[in-house]
Image: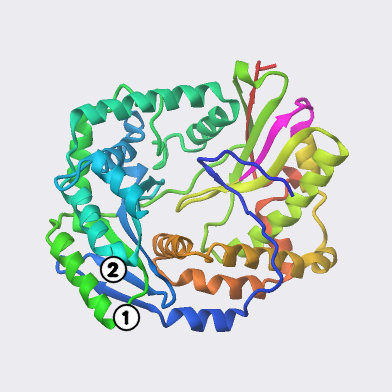
Amino acid sequence: MFKKLFLLLVFSFTLISCTSVPKDSAYYKENIKDFSQIKLQNGIPVILKNVPTSKITVIQMIIEGGTPLLSTDKSGLENVTLELMLHGCDLYSYEEIKKLEYEISYSLTMSSSKDYSVVRLKCIDKDFDTVFSLFADSVLNPLMQKEDFEQIMNEKKESVQQVLSNPSSLLGREVHKIAYKNHNYAALVSVTEESINSISYKDVIECYNKILNSNRIKFVVVGNFNTDRTEILKNRLDEYFGNIKTEDFNVPIINKVSVKNEVVNITSEQAGDVGYLIGFFNCPNRYDLDYVPYAIATMYLDDILFSYVRENKGAVYSIGSGILGGKEMLGAISAFKVSDKENIIKLINESIEMFPNQKEIETKLDQYKNKYITTLFSSSQNITGVASNIVISLEYANNPTKYLERTKEVQNVTAKQVLEAYKKYLSRENDKNPITWVFCKKDKN
């Protein structure tokens, strides 16, 4: 199945084949015993996952808040702040950091999302002492030089122009603006053409100072940790991060997104003779009871979309479903390089109504369950994937081990639940389940 959704905003289900999948009970029991939690002297929680066979350690510093803390004219501010934060520190210049990264093969990176940001250190255990001090100094004593800020903003200007000149990227940005207008998520994670001239060096310094608040910070650490090494790690974290100030902070409460039945047309000369389409709609959140049945229902739908819209009707080059992530999620259907622009929405709606009945669902249910479970296990095949799973569970379920329960949830799904999820979130009968379609093409006709 070929699926392509815009990269920054939509997560698609990637299915990878495998010969066998471990039983959930054994997997859960094998992993749950390796979790522990400690607290620094200022209350910062540290989630530890012991992987006895690993020779690599991953530390993820989670910064709570995300885009709900920003106005739209400051979109991308936290992303710029963290990028500047990693441009040299008291102990190491930026050039020295890059040179050291090449010499000992570690990585110090950052990423931002709607609800939180992450500063991530990954290194071989033998280099841990060296790079941990670099990581800590980069967070606590960054140079934050104005000339580096100006260089970063010039690079962001180029990125903004690339978005505006690429129809699929432009579509993704416009979908976000339309979906989250007057919503907590209205600001974008990345810099936009509206914010590029609004973000100042002073804004970045103020943003950095707000980040250093123990009530906004959590750590997730994955590696080979025996009792002695755990104590050493706690002491090191306390030494560097245990004195971060504690100030009032409340994690933003995210409102439900309202979706209308409408078609919004946007133009891009670069679209040429084809169109780029995304429709978004309400769906369950990541850890709602309906989510796994819904996710499996979209697997059935993806096969129908591919078979009917692409293969049978030849109306599009790529088509598939996914989600717009966050604490309040939206479902999405994307169609890229649409040749039949006049009928594409009609064809997609026809595909949705071709959804199988309960008996037909049963015939393929185990196949789809195996695909889903394979995806879950493939994301835990390396230590970075394990750390990411823990962060997502922590942020969206307030439980760092919640991801371990997913395979059991998948195994327990029934054909009836899949059909009910389809009816509740996907069916277009009598215009239920409104979809907002955003269509990017050369002209509005």
Whether residue 3 sits left or right of residue 96 in the image: it is right
In which quarter of the view is residue 297 placed? bottom right
Does residue 268 sit above or below 388 in this rendering? above
Q: Residue 396's spot in the image, x, y percent?
A: 43, 60
Q: Report the front residue among 14 and 178.
A: 14
Query: Total marks drawn?
Result: 2
Q: Earlier in the sequence, mark 2 or mark 1?
A: 2
Residues shaded magenta: 332-345
- The residue identified by callout 2 is 46
**Residue depicted at 54% across the width and 27% down the height:** 170
**Residue depicted at 50% across the width and 49% down the height:** 325
Q: Report the front residue among 365 and 260.
A: 365
Query: Is residue 261 on the magenta stretch?
Result: no
Q: Which mark is residue 211?
A: none
Q: Residue 407's spot in the image, x, y percent?
A: 59, 72
**Residue depicted at 42% across the width and 63% down the height:** 387
Image quadrant occupied by the C terminus: top right
Q: Secondary structure at mark 2?
A: strand
The answer, for residue 320, to whether it is visible in the render is yes
Of all residues, the one furthest to the front in this rendering is 103
Q: Residue 100's spot in the image, x, y percent?
A: 29, 49
Whether residue 203 sits left or right of residue 342 in the image: it is left
Q: Secondary structure at mark 1?
A: loop
Query: Is residue 339 on the magenta stretch?
Result: yes
- The residue identified by callout 1 is 226
Q: Report the front residue among 248 and 52.
A: 52
Q: Residue 140's spot in the image, x, y percent?
A: 17, 50
